[in-house]
Image (spheres, grey):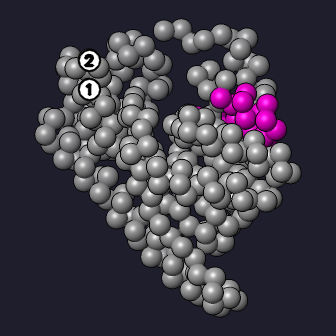
């Protein structure tokens, strides 16, 4: 691993995604830049750079100039890492608050049998997620819904979630998924389609990953921007078997489903266009 790769990997460990880490490192090494030359150096699109810079500004790691054209400079490394750490801690605290709110909401539903108490658990590694998710997929009977960013789509393929999805479909279950179908994800999304899943394309989706099984079991990501594909790799994901939370996630899914297009159509268009130019 090169020094730059190692540095980027450590930045990802602080809660940055890959593009954010590469952009911050580039500004740290080469100084302030405007979006156009930055996009050229990183071999990406200007719009993509703007989104990444906006996210880094929100994290307190990049500072824009007040003059025109706007230049963007990396904040001092020590201050930037402290800011990123505080933001991640803030997100975890927010999830703990959501967890308590959901527990309070669950207790208000008196129609639930007393022996059916909802579980809320924060999973902290790939191993924990797989150990919890795979048995649920294998025992699911009716419906599997998922909404995923790029990292979630790739992790599901690598760690066998798609194979478990295939077994679920073969048992007669219905699976629907939504993702931003890019050229990089063509083969993985094609795999989902080939096993019988109904997948749709929602352009530009960069939000969190979540999955719902049989309108009850839910997994929602806090942070899955992992740097190494190992079972003990840290991440943050909330699991619950609360139907109220499942209804909330399902309603969000259905709204996005109505505003998306068939993945097959998008894949064919991307194949015609060919791989993006470097």
Cα–Cα gap, marks 1 and 2: 6 Å
The residue labelled by disc 1 is 6
Q: Residue at x 42, y 50 (%)?
A: 125
Q: Residue at x 36, y 21 (%)?
A: 35
27 relative to 161 in the view: left or right = left
The residue labelled by disc 2 is 2
Task: Give residue 251's mark.
Answer: none
| Closer-to-camera residue (75/22) | 22
Q: Position of residue 77 (x, y in %)?
A: 16, 35
Residue that extends furthest to the right in the rendered view of this protein: 172
SS for dot 1: helix
Q: Is residue 195 magenta?
A: yes
* Magenta segment boundaries in residue numbering: 188-204
| Closer-to-camera residue (64/21) | 21
Q: Are marks 1 and 2 in contact (CB under 8 Å)?
A: yes
71 relative to 252 in the view: left or right = left
199 relative to 85 in the view: left or right = right
Q: Residue at x 39, y 11 (%)?
A: 40
């Amino acid at each position: 691993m090169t020094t730059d790769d190692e540095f980027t990997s450590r930045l990802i460990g602080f809660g940055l995604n890959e593009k954010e880490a590469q952009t911050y490192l580039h500004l740290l090494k080469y100084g302030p830049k405007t979006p156009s030359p930055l996009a050229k150096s990183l071999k990406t699109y200007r719009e993509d750079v703007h989104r990444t810079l906006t996210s880094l500004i929100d994290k307190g790691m990049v500072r824009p100039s007040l003059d025109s054209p706007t230049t963007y400079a990396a904040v001092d490394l020590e201050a930037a890492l402290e800011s990123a750490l505080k933001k991640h801690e803030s997100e975890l605290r927010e999830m703990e608050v959501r967890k308590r709110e959901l527990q309070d909401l669950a207790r208000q539903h008196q129609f639930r049998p007393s022996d059916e108490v909802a579980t809320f658990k924060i999973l902290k590694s790939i191993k924990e997620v797989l150990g919890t998710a795979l048995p649920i997929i294998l025992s699911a009977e009716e419906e599997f819904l998922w909404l995923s960013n790029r990292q979630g789509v790739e992790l599901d393929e690598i760690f066998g979630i798609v194979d478990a999805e295939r077994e679920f479909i073969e048992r007669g279950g219905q699976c629907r998924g939504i993702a931003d179908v890019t050229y990089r994800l063509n083969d993985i999304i094609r795999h989902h389609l080939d096993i019988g899943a109904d997948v749709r394309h929602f352009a530009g989706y960069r939000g969190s990953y979540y999955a719902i099984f049989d309108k009850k079991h839910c997994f929602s990501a806090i942070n899955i921007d992992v740097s190494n594909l190992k079972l003990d790799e840290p991440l943050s994901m909330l699991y619950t078997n609360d139907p109220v939370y499942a209804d909330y996630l399902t309603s969000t899914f259905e709204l996005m489903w109505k505003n998306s297009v068939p993945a097959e159509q998008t894949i064919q268009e991307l194949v015609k266009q060919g791989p993006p130019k470097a």
